[in-house]
Image: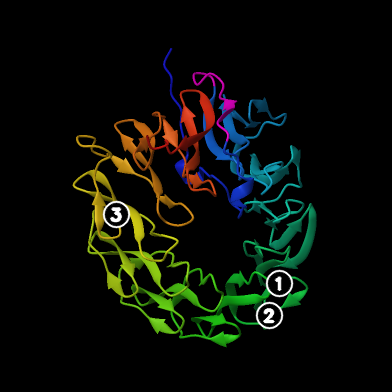
Amino acid sequence: MKKWIVLLLGSVTLWASPVQEEEISFRSAVLGEIPDPDDVKTTQITFSPLGNAVAYAGKEGGKTFVYVGEKKGNSPFDSIGNIVFSPDGKRVAYEGWIRRKQMIVVDGKAGRQYDQVSAPVFSPDSQTVVYPALRGRKAFLVIDGEEKGNHESVGDPIWSTTRNILAYAVQDSDAGYIVYGPMRSARYDRVDFPVLSSSGTLAAFAARENFKWTVRFKSTPGPTFDEVGQPVLSPNEKGIAYPARKGFRWQMVVGKEKGPLFEKVGVPIFSPDSQQVAYWATQDSMEFIVIGNQPQKEFDGAGTPVWSPDNKTVAYPARSSGRGILILGEKTIRFFKKGDLFDEVGSPVFNADGSLYAYPQREGKKWYMVFGKERSFNYDWIWPGVFHPNGKSVAFGAFDRVYLKWRVLRQKAKR
């Protein structure tokens, strides 16, 4: 019998909400077993934030069901998207399509049908589910099944990280504004990308007037551009960074300082001390990481940069001459041990003090988690790792033949 599985990698999720490291499971377990691959096409594999559950979509003939662990959902859909766990891992929500209508399903119960919905978002306390929806020309924010507002469009909602404060962009016929908690921002031609502080105040958002965009940080407008991307607040909440475009070129803006121009730039990544920014960029078909305003070495491909907790090292996966490599500051890691060349490398993670790191690697069709001098068993696919607070073990999701597993790789004691 031929065995095969389809993974929609763009939809594969480890977790979507911040979680406390001490709550994450560091016990290896089999969380699910997919049905016979000859009968069910499996996609949308999603692990819970705490590593204690897994969900996925299974297509049987022309109908698709959601499975949580090995439990099959009762309702069939034409297709399913954006499976999301609550932060505590106890609830599941997803998008469902029936003919031309869409709906959000929460805890197995389908909501109202709409012409269009966006991905569901759980509150930090896991109690509330929100999502934008469109029926005809009317847009709503749906909060636990109740429609709020009557607008031309509603942007994707966000929650503050430590309080249940909600923010989203609204567009009416005459103006746009940001709703955050019980408050509203000033009105502009258009608005987008709200950013909340940890206390739930509106820290930043993008606003357009007279066909020009600016990012307003703590109510102060920055430079004007033809287009801006998602602003990112620094860890100390005193700084802001965002991509911006003038004409056909993009640059990174940190505060009010404009960086060098490139064909494209990625998401800004602040160092833990909030003093530096690193980001992906591309120019003339080559990709590289920029730290501050300094472009680093060019590669055929480069991934998102990751800062070490001590602010000294930027790590990222890259591709060169058809091989995967890991860049660790000024050091290039090309193999786990001599002779084991990487075909592909995934995003690295650091432990709390930055002394150790772990990363996925692929050799041929098999993936491994590498942690110091240790390497996991091989799997058909693995998800990004997360360190235990003691820094001596790393947990990760894995797909092994027909099994969906939560695995822990531990550092062996020195003899």
| Residue 254 magenta-highlighted | no
Kindly tell me whether residue 172 is visible in this rendering: no
Question: How far from the left and from the top, in percent, is residue 110?
Answer: 75, 41
Residue 310, placed above or below residue 357? below
Q: Which mark is residue 180?
A: 1
Q: Secondary structure at mark 1?
A: strand
Q: The magenta stretch spans which residues?
A: 27-39
Quarter the N terminus occupies: top left
Amino acid carrying mark 2 in the image: Ser
Residue occupying the point 57% across, 39% down = 47
The one nearer the camera, 143 or 293, is: 293
The one nearer the camera, 119 or 415, is: 415
| Residue 37 magenta-highlighted | yes
Give the main secondary structure of the magenta stretch: loop
Amino acid carrying mark 1 in the image: Tyr
Q: Residue furthest top?
A: 1
Q: Which residue is the site of mark 2?
A: 185
Question: How far from the left and from the top, in percent, is residue 229?
Answer: 47, 70
Q: Which mark is residue 324?
A: none
Question: How far from the left and from the top, in percent, is residue 230?
Answer: 51, 68
Q: Which of the two discs, 2 and 1, labels the residue nearer the N terminus?
A: 1
Residue 286, placed above or below residue 81? below
Tell me the distance, in whole angstroms, between the alpha carbons under discs 2 and 3: 42 Å
Residue occupying the point 33% across, 69% down = 291
Residue occupying the point 43% across, 75% down = 275
Residue occupying the point 74% across, 40% down = 107
